[in-house]
Amino acid sequence: MAFPQNRLRRLRSSEPMRRMVRETRIDPAGFVLPLFVVPGEGIRKEIGSMPGNYQESIDSAVRHCEEVRSLGIGGVILFGIPETKDELATGAYDPNGIVQRAVRAIKSEVKDLLVITDVCNCEYTSHGHCGFIKGDDVDNDITLEWLARAALSHAEAGADVVAPSDMMDGRVAAIRSKLDGGGFIKTPILSYAAKFASGFYGPFREAAESAPQFGDRRGYQMDPANAREAMREIQLDLDEGADMIMVKPALAYLDIIRMARDRFDVPIAAYQVSGEFSMIMAAGRNGWIDKDRVMMETLTSIWRAGATIILTYFAKDAARLLG
Ligand code: PBG
């Protein structure tokens, strides 16, 4: 039937009506807030390009996690900035590294908050690439051993989930077998399966001090033009034992999230990355857009596309607005 019998505006007439028929609901339990942990004590330094986000020492991160939990947010993902960087990314798999110590402190002091660790080397290498450099390229197979050791050290520290973000081939299998060998058969892997070589990571590289000193990451991260290849990446990671997969960035890749949702029956995470956050914050501060409104609109679009989990720097703001 058509107009005038059908009038879609009837169900839009008031907020209670709109609320009742709403198809997509946002639950902070699906949010994950990224945290940047630095050595030292009493440090809480705001990241210039990411207002409201900090490089913070472990004591501050623990208090921060209390706040995050009290807002009903599902978890945090930890990134570490080590004291020193070297060619072998030693800090990434040091049992006493910055992330390993942060996990221990948070897990012993904050209950009922999932602690996810980002497993990568770019914050720990002097050259800022995600693995071992041979010639002018990252050597895939040597890097796998670093990643597996890092993941095991995170699990030993108490991480609830490990999340490899390096985009080496075969890393999920290497990590799974190392975790299982170490007795961590229950630790899930959230793989950054479809991670694109994106300009939206700009502010993160300031936050994590991980900008590559030469070249770029196009030799390992995906070409933004490829959707079918993203499905292959996801399939391979699932075959290797990934428990959950991620699409990253989110807003410019909603089609990838939707395709993945329609094909794979696993939890799908989407990472609303630093550049997505900073653009909205900057335009909001200029009075060009309503920041809260656009924040909720983008988060809704990511859920609607099919995400189960959203990693977002807006986690606290959005949870407060919903609460
Ligand atoms: C590490 C990593 C990056 C991000 C998450 N993990 C940076 C990169 O790949 O260059 C980006 C997150 C963001 O921009 O918020 N490899």
Image (cartoon, rainbow, N blue to C red):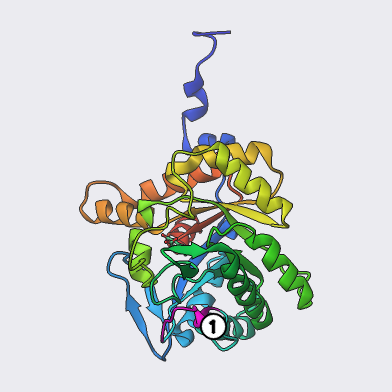
Q: Is residue 87 magenta?
A: yes
Tell me where residue 269 appears, x and y as whole percent: 58, 53
Tell me where residue 9 appears, x and y as whole percent: 47, 23
Residue 19 image-quadrant placement: top right
Q: Is residue 56 left or right of residue 158?
A: left
Ligand 1 quarter of the rendering: bottom left
Q: Residue furthest front?
A: 135
The type of residue carrying mark 1 is Ala
The residue nearer to you, when weighing 48 against 25, is 48
Tell me where residue 51 appears, x and y as whole percent: 31, 66
Tell me where residue 118 appears, x and y as whole percent: 54, 68
Q: Residue at x 56, y 69 (%)?
A: 143
The residue nearer to you, when weighing 39 against 89, is 89
The residue nearer to you, when weighing 5 against 42, is 42
Disc 1 designates what residue? 102
Vertically, is 60 above or below 321?
below
The residue nearer to you, when weighing 100 against 235, is 235
- Per the rendered image, the range of residues in magenta is 84-92
- Quarter of the picture containing the N terminus is top right
Vertically, is 12 above or below 33?
above
How many numbered dots are placed on residues in this image? 1
Q: Main secondary structure of the magenta part?
A: loop
Q: Residue at x 66, y 61 (%)?
A: 172
Is residue 304 in view from this perspective? no
Badge 1: residue crowd in 10 Å (few <14, some 14–19, many ≥20): many
Is residue 97 in view from this perspective? yes
